[in-house]
């Protein structure tokens, strides 16, 4: 819609004003640093940052009702800068100039209601929010759009030039980083570090296709992360892991979109998120807190963080009910089908601890919960979801298994409505589906395929035919007729088709 066609009272707000007073705030010592340069950890105490807007009160002056109309009308604006996560620009990197914003189609992913038979099995109304429908097929694009727009902002302001963007990854961070870097290739190059053989073939091909330097490192993600941290401390590189607080800021858009999708009514809503490095759950909590504090939503939804038994440090931390006795202990991960979340020492743990406290105290009751699920449940529920019209990857299966666990434990009630984070597209992780169907899981995974969920192709090998069609070698008319006839009969027999 053209600017002049918006209602008069909305027009002044349709294009977000560049503003705010953003700082990096250390979660360890509380020190604040200006955002004129890229900082990752506190120079003083070494703890992680979150980005705070010290002038947030200017946004609270706008009534919640008006915000609803601003965001809903802004959705009609055909301006690439504000089509993605920056629809909520006032809450996401508001100092970034609109011309620095990079939009590759991320954000505003579909929220798809589960079909009646699926809802009946689960005993609850629920939706998948398909973040696998982002450009690199995972939610990581949200954070990258934010981090790269900020770097672009620095480049355009002349603060930096010739950036080498670097990250460690369980597969999806690198795909997203390489994608955005390739779009900005005149100023930015990217290098990604992957744990050797611990990402899927699709995830390995993504950064290669985008032209990134790809390094495979022995070990697991936690080992790659240490190397990248060393590189970012000693050399002039831009770190793109979620240690980079700009990533968190962009991923908050997931919560804003849920709020908008449900007409800003978060009453009886439950948002279920898988946890790996814990950047995503941090962002999801932070996003809802910001909208709540600005009066855009009146309730905070329940948040459920899900981990696999094979990579469960956050779950174990919160398993201790007495906050005084909680102690964070990194775990040694075991092979997990939720491979992008196979992390034993999450970088964002201090952020989680900080956010959970704030969230629960704002809500005035416990609203954040953690559950763990088995590898078997992750696989079974992924496959069941996809047999009911979804495109969930293993992590989507993990959230669904987590919802069911939370329901059993009484954390989720019958009249709640759940929104499950389907963090990546099923296709990225289809090798696990293949292992399931072929019963070829290495024993460490502890997954036994259920015969009712296995599905394999049937090769038709027509008996009594001398010649079969082949590339460049079509059959003659008679042979071809015979071929079509015999093959159809074989298929009809298998499907038990009735003759007409
Ligand atoms: C990165 C990732 C996760 C884990 O998110 P964190 O922010 O690391 O907790 C879950 N699922 C998928 C598909 C991912 O790519
Ligand atoms: Zn500090």
Image: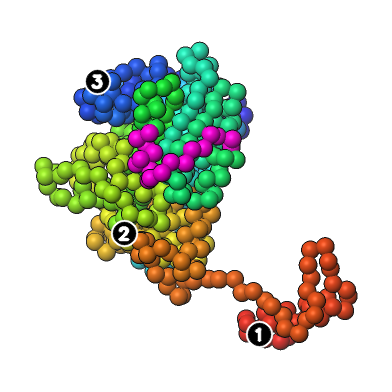
For the residues bearing labels 3 and 1, Cβ distance under 8 angstroms = no
Asked if residue 216 is among those painted magenta in the image, a careful observer would answer: yes
Spatial CA span between label 3 and label 1 = 74 Å
Q: Quadrant of residue 51?
A: top left
User: Element type at marker 2?
Assistant: strand
| Image spot of residue 140 (x, y percent) | 46, 40
Q: Give the secondary structure at mark 3.
A: loop
CA distance separating discs 1 and 2:
41 Å
Label 2: how many Cα within 10 Å (few below 14, some 14–19, many 20+): many
Which residue shows up at 51% across the image and 37% down it? 214
The residue indicated by pointer 2 is 373
Neighbourhood count class around disc 3 (C-alpha, 10 Å): few under 14, some 14–19, many 20 upward: few
Q: Earlier in the sequence, mark 3 or mark 1?
A: 3
Quick check: is the Cβ at mark 3 less than 8 Å away from ligand 2? Answer: yes
Front in this rendered view, residue 422 or 444: 444
Single out the mark in the foreground, 3 or 2. 3
**Mark 1 or 2, nearer chain start:** 2
Residue positioned most to the front = 218
Residue underneath mark 3: 44
Q: Nearer the viewer, mark 3 or mark 1?
A: 3
Query: Whole-Å distance between the Cαs marked 3 and 2?
Result: 38 Å
Residue extent of the magenta highlight: 210-227
Q: Is residue 185 shown left or right of residue 35?
A: right
Name the residue furthest right.
477
In the rendered image, residue 309, in percent from the top left (x then y), is placed at 29, 57
Which one is earlier in the sequence, the residue at label 3 or at label 2? 3
Q: Does 371 sit left or right of 441 as displayed?
A: left
């Amino acid at each position: 819609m053209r600017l002049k066609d918006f209602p008069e009272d909305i027009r002044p707000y349709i294009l977000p004003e560049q503003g705010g007073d953003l700082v990096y705030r250390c979660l360890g010592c509380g020190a604040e640093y200006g955002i004129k340069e890229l900082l990752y950890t506190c120079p003083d105490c070494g703890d992680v940052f979150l980005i705070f807007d010290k002038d947030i009160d200017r946004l609270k002056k706008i009534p919640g009702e008006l915000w609803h109309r601003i965001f809903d009308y802004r959705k009609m604006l055909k301006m690439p800068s504000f089509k993605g996560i920056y629809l909520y620009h006032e809450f996401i990197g508001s100092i970034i100039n609109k011309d620095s914003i990079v939009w590759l189609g991320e954000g505003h992913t579909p929220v798809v209601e589960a079909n009646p038979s699926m809802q009946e099995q689960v005993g609850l109304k629920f939706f998948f929010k398909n973040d696998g429908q982002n450009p690199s097929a995972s939610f990581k694009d949200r954070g990258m759009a934010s981090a790269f727009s900020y770097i672009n902002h620095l480049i355009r302001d002349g603060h930096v030039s010739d950036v080498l963007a670097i990250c460690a990854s369980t597969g999806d961070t690198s795909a997203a980083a390489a994608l955005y870097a390739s779009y900005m290739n005149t100023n930015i190059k990217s290098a990604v570090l992957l744990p050797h053989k611990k990402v899927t073939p699709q995830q390995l091909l993504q950064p290669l296709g985008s032209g990134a330097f790809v390094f495979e490192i022995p070990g697991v993600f936690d080992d790659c992360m240490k190397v990248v941290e060393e590189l970012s401390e000693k050399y002039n590189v831009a770190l793109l892991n979620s240690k980079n607080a700009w990533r968190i800021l962009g991923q908050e858009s997931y919560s804003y979109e849920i709020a908008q999708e449900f007409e800003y009514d978060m009453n009886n809503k439950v948002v279920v998120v898988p946890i790996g490095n814990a950047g995503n759950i941090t962002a999801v909590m932070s996003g809802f807190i910001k909208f709540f504090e600005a009066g855009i939503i009146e309730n905070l939804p329940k948040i459920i963080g899900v981990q696999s038994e094979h990579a469960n440090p956050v779950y174990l931390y919160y398993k201790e009910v007495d906050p005084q006795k909680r102690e964070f202990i990194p775990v040694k991960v075991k092979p997990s089908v939720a491979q992008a979340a196979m992390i034993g020492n999450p970088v964002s743990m201090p952020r989680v601890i900080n956010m959970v406290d704030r969230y629960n105290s704002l809500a005035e009751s416990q609203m954040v919960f953690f559950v763990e699920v088995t590898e078997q449940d992750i696989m079974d529920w992924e496959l069941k979801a996809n047999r009911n019209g979804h495109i969930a990857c293993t992590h989507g299966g993990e959230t669904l298994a987590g919802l069911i666990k939370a329901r059993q434990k009484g954390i989720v009630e019958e009249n709640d409505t759940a929104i499950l984070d389907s963090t990546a597209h099923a296709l990225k992780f289809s090798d696990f589906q293949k292992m399931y169907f072929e019963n070829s899981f290495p024993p460490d995974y502890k997954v036994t395929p259920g015969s009712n969920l296995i599905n394999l192709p049937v090769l038709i090998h027509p008996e009594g035919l001398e010649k079969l069609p082949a590339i460049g070698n079509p059959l003659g008319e008679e042979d071809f007729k015979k071929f079509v006839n015999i093959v159809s009969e074989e298929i009809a027999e298998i499907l038990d088709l009735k003759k007409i």
